[in-house]
Image: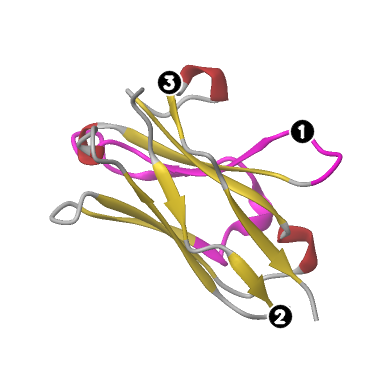
Amino acid sequence: QVRVVESGGGLVQPGGSLRLSCASSQLTLEYYATGWFRQAPGNEREGVLCIENSAEDGTTYYIDSVKGRFTVSRDKAKNMVYLQMNDLTPEDTAVYYCAAGPSFDTLDSRYPYWGQGTQVTVSS
């Protein structure tokens, strides 16, 4: 089963930072759009942001609440995509998922390759 793997979650205080990583041993991630999604308890999964495949380039934010705080980057040599999260708030607490697909899409169902998720908890 082709999949991606997230890592880097944990417990952080409000105002702190975390960097999540997304990797795959089966996909060359630069050829895929990689979206970051999150799901908080009792809530539906929501898109956070997406980095396009390297041919398309660019980043698209699904939600405004992370603009100015979250950024996404790619390391082609390491076949990794990173989600840098700064100035975290308790409202950012969720399981974070990365997903790979052919291009950015507003529908998460259009991303065929998903990870198992990593927990991010923002609490004092």
Per the image, label 1 sits on a secondary structure element best described as loop
Residue 46, given in percent of the width and then of the height, sits at 67, 37
Tag 2: amino acid: Gln
Disc on res. 112: 3
Per the image, label 2 sits on a secondary structure element best described as loop
Tag 3: amino acid: Pro
- Image-based side of 45 in relation to 68, left or right: right
Pointer 1 residue: 44
Pointer 2 residue: 13
> Which quadrant does the C terminus fall into?
bottom right
Residue at the extreme front: 1
Residue 76, given in percent of the width and then of the height, sits at 17, 51
Mark closer to the chain start, 1 or 3: 1
Examine the rendered structure and indicate whether residue 101 appears above or below residue 59: above
Q: Would you identify the image quadrant in which residue 103 lies?
A: top left
Mark closer to the chain start, 1 or 2: 2
Residue at the extreme left: 77
| Magenta residues (range) | 41-70
- Image-based side of 101 in relation to 26, left or right: right
